[in-house]
Amino acid sequence: MSRIFSPGMALVLMLLAPVTLGAQEKKRPPNVIIIYADDMGYGDLGCFGNTKIKTPHLDLMAKQGSRFTSFYVTQAVCSASRAALMTGKYSNRAGILGALGPASKNGLARAHTTIAEMLKTLGYATSMIGKWHLGHLPEYLPTRRGFDEFYGLPYSNDMWPKHPTTKFPDLPLIQGEKTIEFNPDQTKLTTSYTERAVQFIKKNKDQPFFLYLAHNMPHVPLFVSDRHKGKSAAGLYGDVIEELDWSVGQILRTLQELGIDEDTLVIFTSDNGPWLSYGNHSGSAGLLREGKGTAWEGGVRVPFIARWPGRIPPDRTQPEPAMTIDLLPTIARLTGAKLPQGKLDGKDISPLLLGEKNAKSPHEAYYFYWSTELHAVRSGSWKLYFPRTYRSMIGNEPGKDGTPGLYKNVKAGLELFNLDTDLSEKTNIVAGYPEVVRRLELMADRMREDLGDSLRQKKK
Ligand code: MG
């Protein structure tokens, strides 16, 4: 051993060290852009099988990068989903469930580090544009959670005085921490978010940056600019998606023009599946069952596209399961940031993202809670659902005045599906695979010991 660390060798290492460091210094850590759509379905994009809505920029982004076909959110509702994205933890662990409203005093607790706070330790410039929804009181705003700037709405765009069934106060548009307008013209939101995103990128082109662009669209009420109105073959909803696609095109074009394409990881995904009770004002989950508000695939599986020229190989489809909780640890790995202290649920999926040969999901299973109830677990191609009541939205037509269709509570028992052979979850095969059920039950029990399960606690 002493021979290895001989003085001569130490000298050689010392001489080599500056050369190596110099090369590393030149290679800056990547910029990170996360574009988060609101209530966009698995089947809403051309590159995910939609034949009516035209999404040429997202389709090209997928061609130039990777398309994940089994990408999940933790819970199919706005605030819970965003808490997991920002912290790398299941929504329950991050302490945010459901959708926070204007009356809520709650927000994402400081103990849960956000991606922005993590990247701030490396000196990243950070910006949040769009829908925050992790607490609207000053102490919870993005500017207190690692973002240098914020421009957008603190919660959903339907939490305003014109809501068809609920009385909400005026909806604030916030810049930094100041309300600059109430009930802003929502036909202009996607455009102004995009313009600000482009400005932020241009301003920070010479240093690493993190941009979190969380569009309010296509969450109801739908709004689109005059430029895209009436253009789609899929009605107003199609117009809205096509405008989001235009927005992605603007951002990618800016990166190319600035010559920072190869320095920038861009991720596009959605916070949950389509809100089916709004009829033709909701999107499509494609072949997947149900939508927002459920743990069925249509609620929690979302489109996911990642692009990073030179690092992510082009035109790849990644069928391995992955989840929003994995983004924080993956971004930590790719940027060299230190992981936040405390337990994370997400894992580094950079081998999947970068297309490493034979890369597999680092997770034994993913768990799907609805609020504090454990509804399902997915391991490999198997998805096991536990006895539960869920809110079905299928077949509930919205009223002509814009009121949503009613939910139907459905009581369901133990159900097992093989997603490889039954993507639409039509045939419950629980009776045929007792050993699979037992294995997934055991995994679920371990998760219950950790995060609880109010369905089981009630029985005791
Ligand atoms: Mg949503």
Image: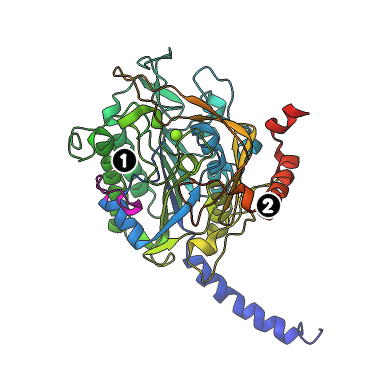
Residues 15 and 228: in front is 228
Name the front one of labels 1 and 2.
Answer: 2
Q: Nearer the viewer, residue 60 or 139?
A: 60
Which x, y percent locates residue 205? 37, 53
Q: Name the amino acid, label 1.
A: Thr
Instruction: Say few, some or many: other residues with alpha carbon within 10 Å of mark 1 (under 14 / 14 to 19 / 20 or more).
Output: many
**Image vertical order of residue 308 relative to residue 104, above or below:** below
Question: Taken as a whole, is the magenta stretch helix, strand or loop?
Answer: loop
CA distance for labels 1 and 2? 51 Å
Q: Residues within 10 Å of mark 2 (few under 14, many from 20)?
A: few
Span shown in magenta: 46-55
Q: Earlier in the sequence, mark 1 or mark 2?
A: 1
Quadrant where the N terminus sits is: bottom right
Q: Residue shown at 28%/50% (left/top)?
A: 249
Residue 390 pos. (x, y %):
55, 31
Can residue 211 be seen in this snapshot? Answer: yes
Element under label 2? Answer: helix
For the residue labelled by badge 1, is the local secondary structure a helix, a strand or a loop? helix
Residue 291 x %, y %: 44, 37
